Image (cartoon, helix red, strand yellow):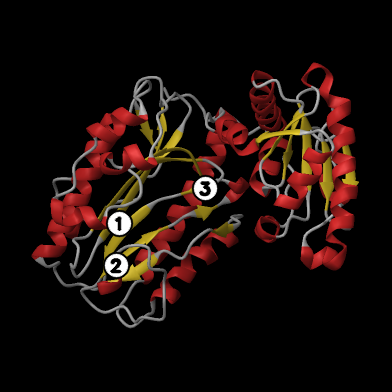
Amino acid sequence: MNEPEPALDLARLRAYRLQRVREQLKSRELAGVLLYDPINIRYATGSVNQAVWTLHNPARYAFVPTEGGVVLFEFHGCAHLADGLETISEVRPATSWFYFVAGPRVEEKTVGWAREIVELVTLAGGPRKKRLAVDKCDPMGSAALRSLGVELFDGQEILEQARAIKSPDELIQMRAAVSVCEQGMTAMREALRPGMTESQLWSILHQVNIANGGEFIETRLLTSGSRTNPWFQECSARVIEAGDLVSFDTDLIGPYGMCADISRTFLCGDSKPTDEQSRLYGLAMTQIHHNMNILAPGVTLREMAHQAWQLPPPCLPNRYAVVIHGVGMCDEYPYCPYREDFDSAGYDGTLLPGMTVCVESYVGEAGGLEGVKLEQQVLITDSGVELLSGFPFEERLCGSRWI
């Protein structure tokens, strides 16, 4: 008899995340971390406010001490948004010193901001003194903090490492995001027909996501026909034709701010695929399944890169950036490039139970007409992997071997 799915406990989730951050801070003997990235603020505090806007307008931030109360510096008129969050001890108005808001008063605003941060760091420091991690900070702010005796460290490393291991509550959230994403993919598949544009098809995923409590989509990676090769072209007004491959990568931030990062390639219309389309799709399926079979706790990123399926030489120039990458509230640690790129672009690390990762494939020959994009989202377990993304592959393109 299957065990019932545990109920989501948001307070328990927030406590877990804050403790993960503090464990990282303590291990590095830091007084605390100053967070500007809205994803990091959300992870450490549970506070959400205008995430996309504040990704490029640093208008709110949080100070998380290794010990003691968390202080959230909130955008004008938004203090009430933190009501009920037990992770936050105090809400203060943010001091914005980026040019749009501060104009010619940037230096003045920066000095006042730095003094307030240093007061908190000094209060929290104890034996750690003025050792502060920061995830994002423009040069003028870093210089102001250093001029007041603060030693700065990389806050993004701390948050990436904290976010890497998912709690049971986070997995409930991720499954909800994947479910909404796959509802959107189903609606796209049902709507796909010759004569619609790439952008019209892509809009369906957005609509389903928002209607079901999702938040936004980080990219516009949907292309058709000849625009599927090379990869990383974004959707356009191109009219999809019968017989076209349609490839996409969801990059969807769904309910609870969790990411569902799944890729599929459809065949438009009722015709049979060409031999070349089936061949490319078969190669991509082989790559996905081979690499998923390598995943296990204890496997290092170097081992993953070197044991991964080798692309045929004609496909190597158009290879994807990574074999696998982590996923949580967005794409995140770890990052494992192809063996050809590992020494120049990779780093080592170890897959651990509780990590969630995406297994990537893009197959398109240099100079070829079309390309196939596939991607699966999985959980690393104590014994192997659990598949989180269950959206079906195209039987017309891969045949019964993979279905």
Query: What residue occupies the far left of the structure in this picture?
Result: 275
Marks 2/1 in contact by CB < 8 Å: the verdict is yes
Q: Residue at x 32, y 30 (%)?
A: 302
Disc tally is 3
Residue type (three-letter) at the residue carrying disc 3: Cys
Rounded to the nearest angstrom, the CA distance separating label 1 from label 3 is 18 Å
Rounded to the nearest angstrom, the CA distance separating label 2 from label 1 is 8 Å
Q: Residue at x 25, y 59 (%)?
A: 372
Of the pair 267 and 74, the residue shown nearer to us? 74
283 relative to 139 in the view: left or right:
left
Q: Nearer the viewer, mark 2 or mark 3?
A: 2
* Label 2 secondary element: helix
Q: Which mark is residue 228?
A: 2
Marks 2/3 in contact by CB < 8 Å: the verdict is no
Rounded to the nearest angstrom, the CA distance separating label 2 from label 3 is 23 Å
> Is 124 drawn above or below residue 261 in the view shown?
above
Q: Position of residue 110 (x, y in %)?
A: 84, 52
Q: Residue at x 55, y 52 (%)?
A: 253
Q: Which mark is residue 373?
A: 1
Q: Residue at x 35, y 50 (%)?
A: 321
Residue type (three-letter) at the residue carrying disc 1: Lys
Query: What residue occupies the far front of the structure in this picture?
Result: 147
